Image: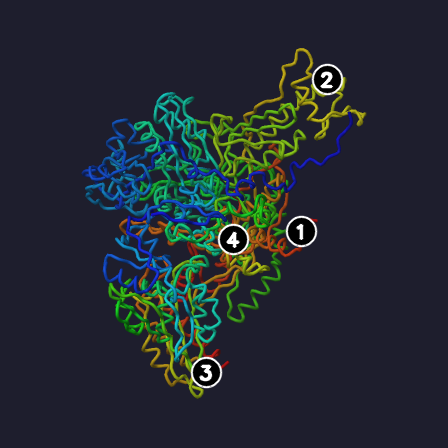
Amino acid sequence: MEVTITVNGAAQTVDVEPRELLVHVIREELGLTGTHIGCDTTSCGACTVLLDGTPVKSCTVFGVQADGRSITTVEGLGAGGLSPMQEAFKQEHGLQCGFCTPGMMLVGTALLEQNPDPTDDEVRWAISGNICRCTGYINIVAAIRAAAAAQSQPPAAASA
Amino acid sequence: MLPSAFEYHRPSTLEEALALLAEHGEDAKVLAGGQSLIPLMKLRFAAPEHLVDVNRIEGLDGIEERDGSLRIGALVRHNHLAASDVIAKYPTIAAAAPQIADPIVRNLGTIGGSLSHADPAGDLGSVMLALGASVILRKAGGEREVPIGEFLLDTFQTSIQPDEMLTEIRVPTPSAGSGGTYLKMERKVGDFATVGAAIFVQMANGTIGSAGIGLTSVGLKNLKATTAEAALAGATPGDDAFAEAGRLAAEAAEPVTDVRGSEAYKRHVVDVYVRRGLARAVEMARG
Amino acid sequence: MATQEQEIRGIGHSVRRKEDDRFIRGQGNYIDDIVLPRMLHMAILRSPYAHAKINSVDTSRAAAVPGVIAVVTGDLMAQHNLAWMPTLSGDTQAVLATDKVRFQGQEVAAVVAEDAYTAVDALELIDVDYDPLPPVVTPQQALESGAPVIRDEKEGQTDNHIYHWENGDKDATDKAFAEADRVVSLDTHYPRSHPSPLETCGCVADVNMGTGQVTIYMTSQAPHAIRTVFALVTGLPEENIRIFSPDIGGGFGNKVPVYPGYVVATAASLLLGRPVKWIEDRTENLISTGFARDFHMHGEMALKDDGTMLGLRVSLLADEGAFHADAQPSKFKVGLFHIVTGSYDFPAAHVSADGAYTNKAPGGVAYRCSFRVTEASYMIERLVQNAAYELGMDPSDLRLKNFIEKDQFPYTSASGFVYDSGDYQGAMNLALEKIGYADLRKEQEAARAEGKLYGIGLASFTEVVGAGPHKDYDILGLKMNDGAELRIHPTGKAILKISSQTQGQGHETTFAQIVASELGIQPEDVKVQHGDTDNTPYGLGTYASRSTPTVGAATAMVCRRIREKATKLAAHLLEVSEDDVEFSAPNFTVKGAPDKAVTIGDVAFAAYTNFPDGMEPGLEGSYYYDPPNLTFPFGTYAVSVEVDADTGEWKVRRMVAVDDCGVRINPMIVAGQIQGGLTEGFGTAAMEQITFDEVGNCIGSNFVDYLLPTAWETPKFELFETVTPSPHHPIGAKGVGESATVGSPAAFVNAVIDALWPLGVRNIDMPLTSAKVWEAIQAARAAG
């Protein structure tokens, strides 16, 4: 079945089997391997992408369901450079093995759209559908809050 | 874990969807949020030949109060429900919605899908039992309203017919002086409940007019603690009444021993949660 | 030429990680990201039974599925002498079952197909005829007389007993117990858990028939050792085998062993002449790859009434599963468990261990742990607390009374370890101060008066890492030494090739920082290469917190080796004698004339452009490090909890962690390691567990049942440090990756038991689910 998905801003048409999971469409048909697979039971969130701006676990969505809709993957964060979220994950040591990181950054990005200045607990709640085995979450929370702080600065101050 | 092949249908109207269900009968499954169905298909516990994706059908995601009831469209996502202003008057729902699964799953999971899945560990079944809700089942050329207690039949079994689709949930609008909550014991975010207790009370002249109690994960389906509810009707709210209700609810529960805890433990938690839930609900009802 | 004044961001600097740039862009290169031309996909059929005889395997229906290229069975593997393989403990393990299956999830057959979906479809069409056999699901059951013999294929194996191992002085220990005023004992089961890195295991095997080259991309924590094992198992020439570990999505011990899937995929590629990819799903990972722990332990401590510790006796029974596959130094049957005397000055100690086969998955891997030190640390720290209460002492006082004193180091323990350095009092006092111990005890008293259950738990762990000296440490004969190779290019930039493999620890940054400190080349100018056996020096890999103790040392030593030559070159450039040159990164300076200097960059350029007659050109070297001793990180963790007596739910109020891992190369990364380790320790204490039902079905076969803590449950840890350098390590570092997982479970459990002690609760086995806590309270109340 032919589907057209707007992927990180660009429309892409791919031929997929209905049973093909969105994560496989993204990784194998579209070649965007930044989206990972960590479990099969919609438990870990490593495969999280934004579907029309909302975080979903792409191992629990069929690719055909994304037809006509838009998805954002980690490759779509940051136009050319790094987004504040990506930069903050590096600065705050919010990643170790890097496997959960794309999902965490996308959830963080969506959170800040809704809540530009979340508390520690609000961040912890928001990322509680995503598992990290390396960091103990402290620095992930710090990174998302640092990104919030960076985004809330006026552009002039941010670049200064 | 990869699903078996199936034929995919994406109707854009309810009529189209109902026609597909009528045509394919038991070979078809409705795909709503997919958060329970797709994992089951990946495990190959489910292998429907036809999947009817209802996500593009308009008009199934409304939340509104009308004619004495709250009407929740079957496609309302858990997070949408949790964020809705309308449910402030329905604190049992307000308490439960943010505790379902995890935040990302709640972005896709739907209320209609959750109830149709009829998992005894599902939270919403208990909530709807406590609130005396009903579901609207549509088929080509007709619809029927079924009380939730008659809808949830057994583990993963409802009274829905293969050609029917759940389109709406109706919850009676409570009068002033009501309260409720949902207490859920889970080992971590995203875990199914070890025990859940949905509580609703409607006060009447300082006494409890009526009460609704639904229990999660302590039976082959969500249970309505009817003896406890009956004991509360007309009772003076207080520790004695709550303790008696807790005792009766625990007695009505049918838990089994598993990794989450022993039968005795779960029964005990039902007791504790019903007592605690009632105290909170009554406090809320008194404003 | 004058001295360059620039800060070298070497040891002690929280340099941001060099590896992050690719990960935050989604440009990591994990195993499943590798796609080769003409690549096939493999899926494995696994046993539904814990124990069953295989009568037949009929693959005809599966082979007929369009897109299926081959179906591999045990019989086919047997024709190539590959139906069995050696384990890291010198046992054998079935690659694909031929005679019978011995655990639920065991590999029975494999389908190789054009795509993964087709391969999984075809699995359902393989018909296996089983005769179920009685399963053995506990080690106690396994050792009963008349128990079904699981390993009946092994010559001479007539029961399920695998080994008996002892350590320490039994007579001296018996004497200590005979003289004791008091003996305190504890029986506990350290439950079976699983490292569960977020990325599962997998490989892409690519056998080139034309060149004979065998390239295996593999999620391996130990690529060099794996290459040697593959050469031995398959008979392929080792120089033609290239193991390539790409980016690894976490390991925690799970990715040390060789798994059947690797062998089958390689055999399939060899037979078919096409690359074969095999990626586990999560259930396969949980039910078949290396589990951890699963020790049934009995500990006894002999004490004087004044609290003086006289002796320690521990016996344990290990549930090893169907194949004895522990990844550990070959000399030791239960790893380094004999570190069980911990931080205390025991005059005598004795450990006795037995292992048994059961119908469960093999493994015994060290889940973020240095070879069973986690189980040991748990036993001693739980026992110390119970001993304190039995004596009527505060647990902190009993610890302080018996700690090995600062001036006793190097300290030879009753079990034979030589502890390198330590300041246990210092770490404990800091932890007590930071958590406000005295005030907490008062608060606890007040809370108790109100019927509330507050608890405070301590754990003062001593770890043992960095295996190890060649005399005692080898795996299947391979000495546990590691190498580093450093090449400095003419422009003064460098490439460091190391034998260990990062799985998130930040090697690409920290090892570059060691070079920075030793030679003055900034970390961003040192590219660290690892994971590719063709392009890195030999070594045994990353696990057991050994990379910094071994490879970190090798890195420092190769720098020093190169510095000797660099000094000669500097002397040549500065036109002075070598003895007149001194080095302070990045400058080589003439003694007494600080304005006369050249930098490492100048020297590097000269090594290729302007070297003295008779000197070999170039500036590079290699070093293999054989550690003179192990290193012994330590610390004290303090936890306060509140327990809901009505439901058994417990919540961490505060968690203070004081770690001493010697010199910290990158403090930011060290803190990250500790935070992660504490979380895995918390997970172990609170929720992680793989259980089996009475017929051997694995409960815990996916993340719905095998629970990992999310950000919501995970406590907010407070980290502090003391620094006691290792005297024998070139830069004084001890290793830190696992301390927190080793030390913290006992602290959480001690806190909960502390809350419940007045009720009569003496022990609860992990994980401390609310149900178990409540049952323990009920049982204690019933006992009165």
Identify the image quadrant of residue B113.
bottom left
Q: Nearer the viewer, mark 4 or mark 3?
A: 3
Mark 4–mark 3 distance (CA, rounded to whole Å): 50 Å
Instruction: Identify the residue position indicated by label 2 in the image.
Output: C572
Mark 1–mark 4 distance (CA, rounded to whole Å): 43 Å
Left or right? Give the position of B76 relative to C606.
left
- Say which amino acid is labelled 4: Ala
Q: Chain of mark 1?
A: A
The location of residue C512, given as percent across then percent down, is 60, 33
Q: Secondary structure at mark 1?
A: helix
Mark 2–mark 1 distance (CA, rounded to whole Å): 49 Å
| Quadrant (top left, top right, bottom left, bottom right) of the N terminus of chain C | top right
Q: Nearer the viewer, residue A7 or B49?
A: A7
Q: Mark 4 near mark 2, Cβ–Cβ under 8 Å?
A: no
Whether callout 4 and callout 3 share a subunit is answered no
Left or right? Give the position of C291 relative to A133.
left
Q: Secondary structure at mark 4?
A: helix
Q: Nearer the viewer, mark 3 or mark 1?
A: 1
Q: Secondary structure at mark 2?
A: helix
Crowd around label 2: few <14 · some 14–19 · many ≥20 (10 Å):
some
Instruction: Identify the residue position indicated by label 4 in the image.
Output: C747
Q: Chain of mark 3?
A: B
- Say which amino acid is labelled 3: Ala
Q: Nearer the viewer, residue A100 or A58?
A: A58
The location of residue C143, given as percent across then percent down, is 29, 43
- Say which amino acid is labelled 2: His
> Which of the two discs, 4 and 2, labels the residue nearer the N terminus?
2
Instruction: Identify the residue position indicated by label 3 in the image.
Output: B176
The residue at the far top in this view is: C614
Q: Nearer the viewer, mark 4 or mark 2?
A: 2
